[in-house]
Amino acid sequence: MEVGAVFCTNAYLLELATALLEHALDKSHTEVSLGDIVDLEDSKRIPLNSRDRAQRKGPYPYYGATAIMDCVDDYLFDGIRILLGEDGAVISDEGEAILQYVWGK
């Protein structure tokens, strides 16, 4: 994916998230947490270091904070996901959070 496509995808995802949040706030007129409008799955993730990944080579992408880091022999998720660095400190040169829009296994 080209840099421009990634930027456009990130901009679209930010617009979508904003619209969903505004819709949730309009309906409830109360505060909502992110977990009220999305499924948070970080607790299901299994971190693999480079040695683990080297021993588990396969066809499935293993994502790091900003890109695919490797391919491994099994997958945890199947479908569309939005990936965000867990500490929120992964940002572009423009100061925007880097999100990954991924799909498949």
Image (spheres, helix red, strand yellow):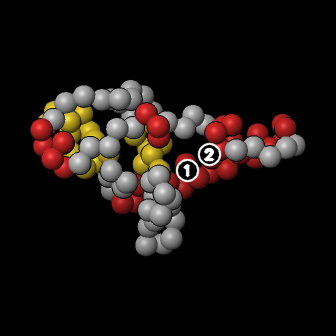
Residue for point 51% across, 71% down: 95
Identify the residue at image location x=85%, y=44%: 30
Image quarter of the C terminus: top left
Lateral position of residue 14 relative to residue 31, left or right:
left
Q: Is residue 40 visible?
A: yes
Q: Say above or below: 36 vs 96.
A: above
Residue 99 is tagged as: none
- Whether the residues at callouts 2 and 1 have beta carbons within 8 Å, the answer is yes
Which of the two residues, 8 or 71, is positioned nearer the viewer here?
Answer: 71
The percent position of residue 91, horizontal first and vertical second, equals 46, 65
> Is residue 1 visible to us here?
no
Say which residue appears at 38% left-offset and 27% top-offset: 78
User: Which residue is depicted at the point 26% across and 39% down?
Assistant: 61
The one of 83 and 11 positioned closer to us in this rendering: 83
Report the amino acid beneath label 2: Leu
| Disc 2 crowd, CA 10 A, few/some/many (<14, 14-19, 20+) | few
- SS under mark 1: helix
Q: Which amino acid does label 1 sit on?
A: Tyr
In this rendering, the answer to whether 38 lies above or below 6 is above
Circle on res. 16: 2
Mark 1 highlights which residue? 12
Q: State the image coordinates of residue 65 (x, y, percent, origin top left).
A: 37, 54
Instruction: Report x, y in % for residue 32.
Output: 75, 43
From the viewer's perspective, tell me whether residue 51 is left or right of residue 2. Answer: left
Q: Residue extending furthest right?
A: 29
